[in-house]
Image (tube, rainbow, N blue to C red):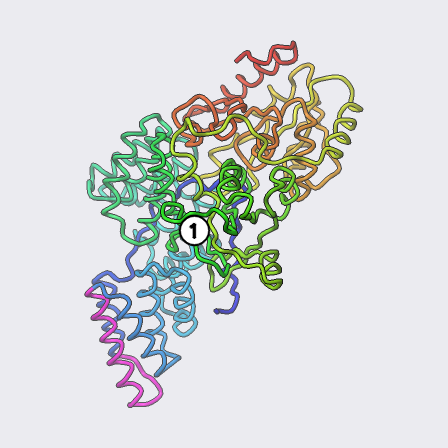
Amino acid sequence: MTAPSPLDTAPQEDAHAPRLAVQSTVGNAASPAAIRRLSHALVGTKPTSAKTQKVVVEKLRAALAAIRNGNYALGAAQAQAAIKADPDSGLAWHVLAICHEKSGEVIAALDAYQAALQRLPEDTDIAHDLGRLAHQLGYLPIAEKLLLRYLAAHPGHAEATNNLACVLRDQNRYPDAIDLLTPLLEIEPGNAVLWNTLGSVMNDRGQVDQALIFFEEALRLDPALAKARYNRANARSPLGDTLGALEDIEAALPGAETAYEQAMMRMARAIMLMGLARIPEGFDAYEVRLDPALPDAMRVAVDAPRWNPKTEDIRGKRLLVVGEQGIADELVFANTLPDVIDAVGPEGQVYLAVEQRMVGLFQRAHPRAIVGGHRAVRLEGRLTRYMPFVQELSDAGVRMDAWTPIASLMAPYRPSVASFPPAQQVIVPDPDRVARWTAELAALGPGLKVGLHWKSLVMTGARAAFFATGFQLWQPILTAPGCVMINLQCGDVSADLAAAEAAGVRIWTPPIDLKDDLEDVAALSIACDLVVGPGIAGTNIAAAAGARTWMVAAPDDWHLMQTDRYVFYPEVRIFKRAAVDGWPQVIQDIRTALDAAVSGDWNTV
C-alpha cells in the first residue's frame, strides 16, 4: 500500500451520486509525439553504472514499443523491471505512470507520476500529465499549480490552457475560466476542444441553453469529438430531449479515449435509461458505478462472494447488504429491503451495513434485519468500505454467505415502475425524540412549522447549478405569512441566517448538530408540518421517515421515471425546476402552495 500523500484528501459526496462530469480535459500521455519525446530522453539517461544503463535502456525501449502497440500491461512490466534496476530513474517512473493511466489504474498512475516528478522536477511534461490526473481525481488546487507550472514554461499552449480552464471551472471560478479561454479562441477559432470546454463552463454555470450552442459548434468543427457529443447529451437531457441525449451518449461511447471517460459515459447512459423507465435494463447498466475506472467507485472489504440474484437462491442464507454512495442513495435504494428480507426467509438473515449515523433509524424500520455501521477508508487510493460489526460477527464464528451492494437489489425486485411499493417508512425515527421536538416546535408559537433545506453540503463544480445561487432567492418562501421557518440545513450557513435576520426574517435553528445528529434531524422532520428543499440528504431523510415533504426536482431527475412523482417516495410532492433560469419560478410555485397550505388547502399547485 502506498503511503498517504497530500492527494488523499478528496471530499466525499453526502447526497445523491454526483452529477455526471463534463468531458473537456484533453491530453494523451501515450500519443505518438509523447512517445517520441520519451524515446529521445532515453538516449540521455545516466544511471549509476554502464551495466545498469544497458538494462534500463533495454527495458524502457521494450516498454515504449509495448505502449505503441497498445499493450500497456506489458509496458508496465517492462517499466517496473527498469525501476528495479534503477529506482531513481525518473524516466522509468514516467513510463510506468503512462502505462497505468492508459490501463485505467488511475491511483497507481498518480503515485508513479509523483515519483517521476520527484526525480525529474524540471520536466514540465510530467507536471502536465500529473496535473491532468490530479484534476480527474478532484485534487483541484494541486492540478492548478501543476498546470500553471507547465504554462510558465510553455505560454499559450492550447492543451494546457484548456485543462487549466477546466480546473478553474470545477472550482466555480467561471469568469476566470472564460477569461482564460476567450483570447485563445480569438487566435484559434477552429479549435473544437476549446469550444467544448467553453460549453462545459456555461453548463456548470447553469446556462444549459448557451452550453448547447457551444457544444454544437465544437461538433460542427469536429464531428468525431466524443467529448463534445457526450457533453451535448448532458445538455439535451435537462432541456427535455432525453431520447436525443441517449443517442448522443451511445454515439460518443466508441470514441472514449480512456477507461475513465468510457465509465463516465456508461454511467450517463445508465441514468438516462433509468430516467426513461427502461428498467431493469437501466438498473443493470447502473452496475457501472462500481467500475474501478471511476475514482470513487466503491470496493467492499468482506470475506464472502457477491450474490448473483439471477442465478442463486438466497433463501436460508446470511446476506450482507452494503449501503453505498451517499445518505440519500442508501435511503432511495432501501425500498427493496422488505423484499430481500422476505427472500431469505425466517431461516435466513439479512445483515445491513449503512451510514453509522443512520443505524438506529434503519433498525427500527427493519427489526428482522441486523443493522450496523460501515466505514470508509482509502486503501492504495481506492475508496474501500468495511463493516466493523461484520468483523465482530466473523470473530464470533458467524460468516456471511454472500453480500450485495444495496443498489443492485433494484434490478431483481423493481423490474417496472408498477413494481415500486406504495408509501412506506424506509426509516423510523425514535418516537420519544419526535414527541420532544413536537413540543419544542409548539413552544415557538402559532404557524405552520416549515423545515427548510436549501443547498447541498457539497457545492463544487456542476453541483452548484442544481441549487439556488443566492439565499435571497428563497425570500418569497421565508416571508410566507402564517409560517415559522425551521433551519434543517447542515453545514456552516451562518452567513445565510445572518442575511435573513437582517431582512427581518426569523429562522429558528435547533440546538443540535444538523450534520451528525441524524436521529434528531429525522425526528424533527416528522415534528414539522412540512419539510421543503432540493433533493439532498436532508430532504431524503424527511421523505424516507414519512414526513410531509415538498422536493424541488431537476428537470431531468431520473428518480421520476417518466411520472409526475418521485417513485421512491410516492407521497412526496414534486416541484420541477426548469433547466434555464428555473429557480425564481419554482420558488414562487412553492410560495403559492405554502399560502394555500396555511389556509388549509394542501393540494393547490
Residue found farthest to the front:
347
- Front one among 30 and 124: 30
In the rendered image, residue 271, in percent from the top left (x then y), is placed at 38, 37
Label 1 Cα crowd, 10 Å radius (few <14 / some 14-19 / many 20+) = some
For residue 107, what is the image quadrant?
bottom left
For residue 529, what is the image quadrant?
top right
- Front one among 50 and 406: 406
Please give the name of the residue rendered at 41% of the width and 56% of the height, measured from the top-left corner: 148
- Give above or below for 408 relative to 603: below
In the rendered image, residue 567, in percent from the top left (x then y), is placed at 47, 28
In the rendered image, residue 116, in percent from the top left (x then y), is placed at 39, 71
- Give above or below for 261 relative to 552: below
Res 155 seen here: yes
Which SS does the magenta portion mostly show? helix
Q: Which residues are magenta?
A: 44-69
Residue at disc 1, secondary structure: loop
> Could you tell whether 114 is left or right of 69 in the image?
right
Query: In this figure, which residue is indicated by the disc labeled 1?
Result: 307
Res 498 seen here: no
> Could you tell whether 151 is left or right of 345 in the image?
left
- Front one among 580 and 96: 96
- Give above or below for 84 relative to 524: below
Q: Amino acid at mark 1?
A: Trp
Residue 297 drawn in magenta: no
